[in-house]
Image (cartoon, grey):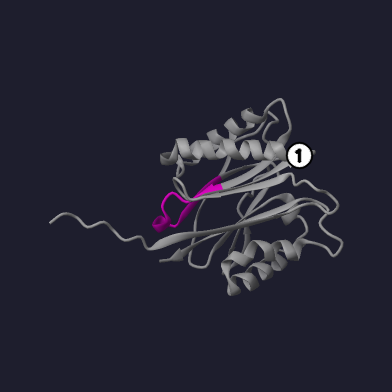
Amino acid sequence: MPAQPLTPKYGVECFGATRTQAGRLTNEDTFVIDRDPVPHAAVFDGAGNAGQAAQRVARFFQTLIKDQPEKVGDAEAWAAWVRLMDSHLMGGAQSTFVGAAVPDPDAARVVGGYAGNARAYLAGEEGIKLITAESSPARLGSGSVEGRTFSIDLRARDILLLMSDGAWVPFSSPSRLRKAVAAAAARHFSEVPEAVLDAATPPDGSPDDMTVVALRLRRL
């Protein structure tokens, strides 16, 4: 009797939101969410009137994923991709970056990389944990980026947040961020990014472009 294919236990939910700095018409941030060839997402923040730089490197990032899907679970591959993105923007405007992919949802593991001051947080039962813990001051395009990576296991109800600096800087304490995430997730997961941006935006509008992508596994 031929072996029967295993039915996946988990799928990936992923939503994003971005807002433009108060008083400006253009947004220097951009984000990527895609399920082909594997679920992946990323946040980019162009530095210095550089929204086109963020969009340019975002397209290049997607090309890397689509050309080498078998490597998305390899931290060394992510380190190489970060350096390639750095080279891709050299000589022009720069961008920060934080991205992640889910090689196999049933393995409950997320692998990613980052450059500049974009951040990844894990929101779970134990609170908020900063995943991009090592300092990475150099932006893509500087020519001096190191391949910073992370690999984490997601548990039930864990939420991975990818955030530009405009989104994470306003949170003076992790408890404020956790409260915003938990309240929105209790309603519908798609509301999480907007809820985080609501909590981060002062009454007179944001002083910076801000972007959040939220990702979690759900049982099928």
Where residue 77 appears, x then y in whole percent?
49, 36
Residue under the image location 66 percent in, 50 percent down: 119
Q: Is residue 187 above or below residue 172?
A: below
Residue type, numbered disc 1:
Ala
Residue under the image location 79 percent in, 39 percent down: 49
- The residue segment tinted magenta is 100-112
Q: Where, quadrant-wise, is the N terminus in this rendering?
A: bottom left
Q: Is residue 86 above or below residue 62?
A: above
Instruction: Please tell me in which quadrant of the rendered image residue 206 appears.
Output: bottom right
Query: At numbered mark 1, what does the secondary structure look like: helix, strand or loop?
Result: strand
Q: Where, quadrant-wise, is the C terminus in this rendering?
A: bottom left
The residue beneath circle 1 is: 47
Q: Is residue 138 visible?
A: no
Q: Is residue 193 rendered magenta in the image?
A: no
Residue under the image location 68 percent in, 40 percent down: 54
Where residue 150 appears, x then y in whole percent?
55, 47
Between residues 182 and 41, which one lies in front from this camera angle? 41
